[in-house]
């Protein structure tokens, strides 16, 4: 056990001192998909003190090609990703305090999640959550690392409050739609490349070697053999509502987040109850069974196949994923028909 | 004309005049992008007015959401 981190401490920029720092740090990881599982495994193996991992989804067969913490039983049993990841991570390194939340992250949740956090890692699949992360990072002066990928393409940027431009400075507008993993696919090396960039920058931050940070927006296309790094420091805007001189943190204000969301490219609508509630899944499964349709469940969710086209997954916190539609109105009508 | 885009030499039709047209040529017109021209990062509102000429070194990064 004692030489568990020996190859990492032999690496001079980390050393014993760096390892000690790593073991005291708390990282918040938002998303437990491809990037999330890659980042989580690397950080847990590296021996971070605490990892909080948050995800709103469950494991499906199409995830197994690249989401490295999951195996077939997780897909068969529709295990929530946060729970399946936590289990595997604890097997990998029992010394790390791994905390999992099956949760959709919006303003209320993120304020609670960032308490005592040294670094936030972005492994989400959407810009709504990223801009929320960006605002909370500025508000509490916590660095965060953006990462994203699709096809054979990926990019990453480290946002350090007070030093670098923020994501809002770089984007100016929220990207809409576009290619997602579900419409043009993704190969696992693109994931691993982004993970490599994110984890390396994370280690630098955790060992407090700020000098070593990349300071560039990096992107690559592994299939087209392209690689780019741009110094974007000049993109920092004084007038930025997230990181400028008079910040209002626009994405943290309630109202910018709706209670329903179409999951990008997934033919799925998520509906959140007005207030979080604890659902009695046993009882719900029984009720739904009586209404026809096929019902199965695990301790975390109920899966209800309404017909060949539509399926609903109800989580313990009352959240529902309506599969088989992109139409919010249709999803809501199904939700109300079966769940009141 | 020949441009150096993301480290690679690329032949682009001479009809491509501005950065905006270049982005359209690569079907990036609907994407949020950061463009660097000869080591200078461009403001987005200047993409339409900035001309590209033979031999320019251009870096283009577009944002994607997947993860
Ligand atoms: Zn900003």
Image (spheres, coloured by chain):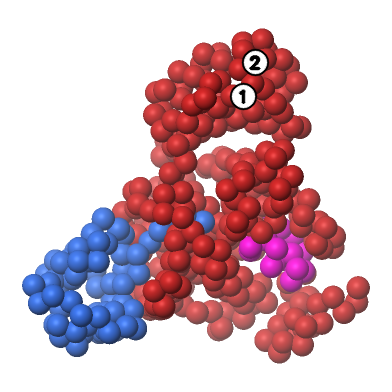
Q: Which tint is chain A?
A: red
The chain under label 2 reads A
In front of the other: A248 or A14? A14
Q: What number is the disc on residue A93?
A: none
In front of the other: A107 or B36? B36
Percent coordinates x, y for residue A215 in the rendering: 46, 77
Picture layout, residue A11 above or below residue A131 = below
- Name the residue that disc number 1 marks: A304
Q: Given contact means CB atoms under 8 Å apart, are the residues at marks 2 and 1 in contact?
A: yes
Disc 1 secondary structure class: strand
Q: As drawn, which residue projects farthest toward the top? A: A290
In front of the other: A35 or A27? A35
Q: In whole angstroms, how far apart are the C-alphas of marks 2 and 1?
A: 7 Å
Disc 2 secondary structure class: helix
In front of the other: A4 or A130? A4
Quadrant into which the N terminus of chain A falls: bottom right
Is the CB atom of the residue marked by disc 1 within 8 angstroms of ligand 1's nearest atom?
Answer: no
What is the magenta segment's predominant secondary structure?
helix
Percent coordinates x, y for residue A310 in the rendering: 51, 26
Percent coordinates x, y for residue B45 in the rendering: 19, 64
**Residue at horizontal 13%, vertical 75%?**
B13
- Letter of the chain shown blue in the rendering: B
- Name the residue that disc number 2 marks: A288
The magenta stretch is A38-52
């Amino acid at each position: 056990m004692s030489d568990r981190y020996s190859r990492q401490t032999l690496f001079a920029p980390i050393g014993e001192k760096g390892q000690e720092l790593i073991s005291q740090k708390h990282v918040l990881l938002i998303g437990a998909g491809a990037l999330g599982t890659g980042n989580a495994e690397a950080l847990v193996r590296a021996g971070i003190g605490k990892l909080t991992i948050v995800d709103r989804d469950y494991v499906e067969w199409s995830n197994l090609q690249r989401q490295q913490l999951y195996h077939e039983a997780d897909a068969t049993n529709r295990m929530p990703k946060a729970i399946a990841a936590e289990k595997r991570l604890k097997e990998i390194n029992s010394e790390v305090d791994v905390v999992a939340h099956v949760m959709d992250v919006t303003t209320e949740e993120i304020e609670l999640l960032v308490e005592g956090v040294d670094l936030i890692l972005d492994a989400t699949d959407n810009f709504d959550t990223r801009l929320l992360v960006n605002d909370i990072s500025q508000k509490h002066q916590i660095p965060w690392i953006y990462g994203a990928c699709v096809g054979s393409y990926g990019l990453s940027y480290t946002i350090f409050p007070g030093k670098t431009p923020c994501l809002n400075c770089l984007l100016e507008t929220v990207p809409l739609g576009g290619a997602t993993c579900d419409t043009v696919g993704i190969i696992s090396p693109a994931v691993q490349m982004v993970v490599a960039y994110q984890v390396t920058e994370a280690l630098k931050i955790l060992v407090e070697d700020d000098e070593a940070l990349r300071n560039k927006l990096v992107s690559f296309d592994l299939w087209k053999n392209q690689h780019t790094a741009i110094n974007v420091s000049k993109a920092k805007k004084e007038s930025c509502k997230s990181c400028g001189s008079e910040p209002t943190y626009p994405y943290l204000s309630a109202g910018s987040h709706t209670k329903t969301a179409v999951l990008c490219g997934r033919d799925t609508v998520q509906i959140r109850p007005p207030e979080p509630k604890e659902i009695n899944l046993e009882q719900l499964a029984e009720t739904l069974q009586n209404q026809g349709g096929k019902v199965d469940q695990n301790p975390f969710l109920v899966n209800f196949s309404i017909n060949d086209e539509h399926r609903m997954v109800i989580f313990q916190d009352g959240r529902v994923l309506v599969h088989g539609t992109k139409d919010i109105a249709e999803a809501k009508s199904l939700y109300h028909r079966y769940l009141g | 004309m020949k441009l150096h885009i993301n480290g690679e030499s690329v032949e682009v039709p001479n009809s491509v005049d501005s950065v905006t047209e270049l982005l359209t040529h690569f079907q990036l017109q609907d994407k949020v992008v950061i463009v660097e021209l000869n080591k200078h990062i461009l403001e987005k509102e200047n993409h339409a007015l900035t001309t590209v000429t033979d031999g320019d070194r251009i870096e283009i990064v577009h944002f994607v959401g997947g993860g």
